[in-house]
Amino acid sequence: MNIILLGPPGAGKGTQARHLVETRGMVQLSTGDMLREAKDSGTEMGNRVAEVMAKGELVTDEIVIGLIREKLEQGAEGGFIFDGFPRTLAQADALGELLAEKGEHLDFVVELQVDDETLVQRIVNRAEEARAAGQPVRADDNEESVRIRLMEYYKKTSPLIGYYHAKGGLRPVDGLADIGDVTASIEAVLA
Ligand code: ADP
């Protein structure tokens, strides 16, 4: 089974993806994590990506589609969870084509619904907790970048809700519920 977790920054996509990895042996493909790795590589591409990410803007479709293409080649018995990808219509089209080339398809698009102020609060709190614990804080987890990330989401990613609604398979889930309840709702969709 292949699924997308769709939702604005801070909606809990990563948390829910990790749960599905543990319970179902699915493979999480987080383009955010992949890009942070590329950034840490210190290459010229990595440095360019780092600047764009710190501001809260989207990295080019070409780069992220390339990253996903590589991972899809490796296959996943338990299926893939796309987390933070696709984020644009071009990425959504590319994903459909890449899966079709492998004789695969998307089963569900789980849309985590949350409200904006909760998101900003969640992310700012996450950064404060990390700072207090002496852990590294993401360069884009500050209020200014979060607001840009949200705007990028509404401009470029939220059209995917209509896109997947029309294609079929869109499943809205209340992302404001407790983590365990969100997990249960997702399990119910996948059952
Ligand atoms: P969040 O969902 O909390 O914003 P991510 O880790 O998914 O965090 O993404 C962090 C940043 O990485 C994004 O703001 C963007 O700059 C970049 N990024 C991640 N995935 C994509 C993508 N599919 N397309 C373009 N940029 C991306």
Image: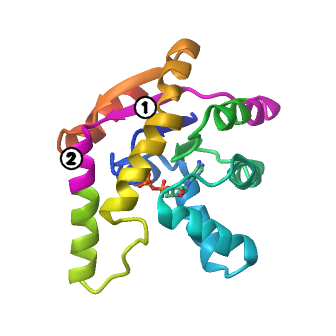
Name, please, the residue furthest toward the left: 178
Q: Check the image and report above or below for 189 versus 12.
A: above
* Mark linked to residue 190: none
Q: Secondary structure at mark 2?
A: helix
Residue 142 horizontal/vertical position (percent): 33, 66
Mark 1 vs 2, N-terminal side: 1
- Please identify the quadrant where the C terminus is shown: top left
| Residue 6 visible in image | no
Q: Secondary structure at mark 1?
A: strand
- Please identify the quadrant where the N terminus is shown: top right
Q: Residues within 10 Å of mark 1 (few under 14, many from 20)?
A: many
- Is 77 on the left or on the right of 116, as rendered? right
Tag 1 and tag 2, C-beta contact below 8 Å: no
Where on the picture, by quarter, is residue 51?
bottom right
Residue 3 horizontal/vertical position (percent): 53, 35
Name, please, the residue furthest toward the right: 101
Residue 132 horizontal/vertical position (percent): 20, 82
* Mark linked to residue 110: 1
Q: Residues within 10 Å of mark 2 (few under 14, many from 20)?
A: few
Spatial distance from mark 1 to mark 2, Cα to Cα? 19 Å
Residue 96, magenta (yes or no)? no
Task: Name the amino acid type tagged 1.
Answer: Val
**Callout 2: CB less than 8 Å from ligand 1:** no
Q: Check the image and report above or below for 126 versus 66.
A: below
Q: Residue at x 24, y 38 (%)?
A: 115
Q: Residue at x 36, y 76 (%)?
A: 137
Between 191 and 66, the one nearer to me in the picture: 66
Task: Name the amino acid type tagged 2.
Answer: Thr
Question: Magenta region: which residues?
Answer: 97-121
Q: Residue at x 43, y 31 (%)?
A: 110
- Is 131 on the left or on the right of 177, as rendered? right
